[in-house]
C-alpha cells in the first residue's frame, strides 16, 4: 500500500500562484512516476504534469510555461508550483503514484485538493 498526503490547495485570484505538495509513504519503489491530475466540474480527470524518479517531466499543453513539477526523492515528495493561474485552472487536483514492473503494477491516488481561481 502507498499513502499519498496532499496539501497546498486553496483559493486565489487570477494571475496568482499556489504550490501543491504530495508526500508518499508506505511500500515505495525507487522507480516510479508521480504526478498531478485535475478534474474540473463536469469534466473527466486530466493529466496536469508528471515526473519520474530520474526527473523526466511531462506537462499538459494548457499549463506549459506556467506550472512546474519537481520532486524530492529523499522526502518522497512531489511539488506542483502553479503560477499565472487562470479561472480555467479551477479543479480538484489529485496526486498519483505509479510503479510498474513485470508482475507488479501499483497505481495510487490521493484524495484530492481543491484549487479555485476566481476574482
Image: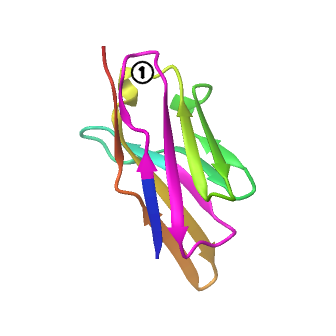
Quadrant housing residue 61: top right
* 65 or 75: nearer the viewer: 75
Q: Is residue 99 above or below residue 59?
A: below
Q: Position of residue 78 (x, y in %)?
A: 58, 50
> Does the segment drawn in magenta span residue 26?
yes
Q: For the magenta stretch, what is the residue range?
A: 6-35
Question: Outermost residue toward the bottom?
Answer: 103
Q: Is residue 102 above or below residue 7?
A: below
Q: Position of residue 95 (x, y in %)?
A: 46, 53
Question: Outermost residue toward the front?
Answer: 75
Residue at 61% over, 59% down = 76
Q: Is residue 5 above or below residue 12?
A: below
The local crowd at label 1, few if under 14, some if 14 to 19, many if 20 or more residues have their Cα within 10 Å, is many
Name the side, left or right, on which 2 lies relative to 55.
Answer: left
Name the side, left or right, on which 74 lies relative to 17.
Answer: right
Classify mark 1: helix, strand or loop.
loop
Quadrant housing residue 88: top left
Residue at 36% over, 22% down = 87
> Does the segment drawn in magenta span residue 104?
no
Q: Position of residue 11 (x, y in %)?
A: 33, 27
Q: Which residue was labeled with disc 1?
A: 86
* 113 or 52: nearer the viewer: 113
Q: Position of residue 117 (x, y in %)?
A: 35, 24
Asked whether the viewer can see residue 60, the reply is no
Q: Quadrant of the C terminus?
A: top left
Amino acid at each position: 500500500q502507498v499513502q499519498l498526503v496532499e496539501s497546498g490547495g486553496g483559493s486565489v485570484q487570477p494571475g496568482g500562484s499556489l504550490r501543491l505538495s504530495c508526500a508518499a509513504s508506505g511500500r515505495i519503489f525507487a522507480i516510479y512516476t508521480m504526478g498531478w491530475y485535475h478534474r474540473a466540474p463536469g469534466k473527466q480527470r486530466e493529466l496536469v504534469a508528471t515526473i519520474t524518479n530520474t526527473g523526466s517531466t511531462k506537462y499538459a499543453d494548457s499549463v506549459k510555461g506556467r506550472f512546474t513539477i519537481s520532486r524530492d526523492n529523499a522526502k518522497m515528495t512531489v511539488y506542483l508550483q502553479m503560477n499565472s493561474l487562470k479561472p480555467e485552472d479551477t479543479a480538484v487536483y489529485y496526486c498519483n503514484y505509479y510503479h510498474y514492473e513485470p508482475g507488479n503494477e501499483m497505481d495510487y491516488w490521493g484524495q484530492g485538493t481543491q484549487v479555485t481561481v476566481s476574482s
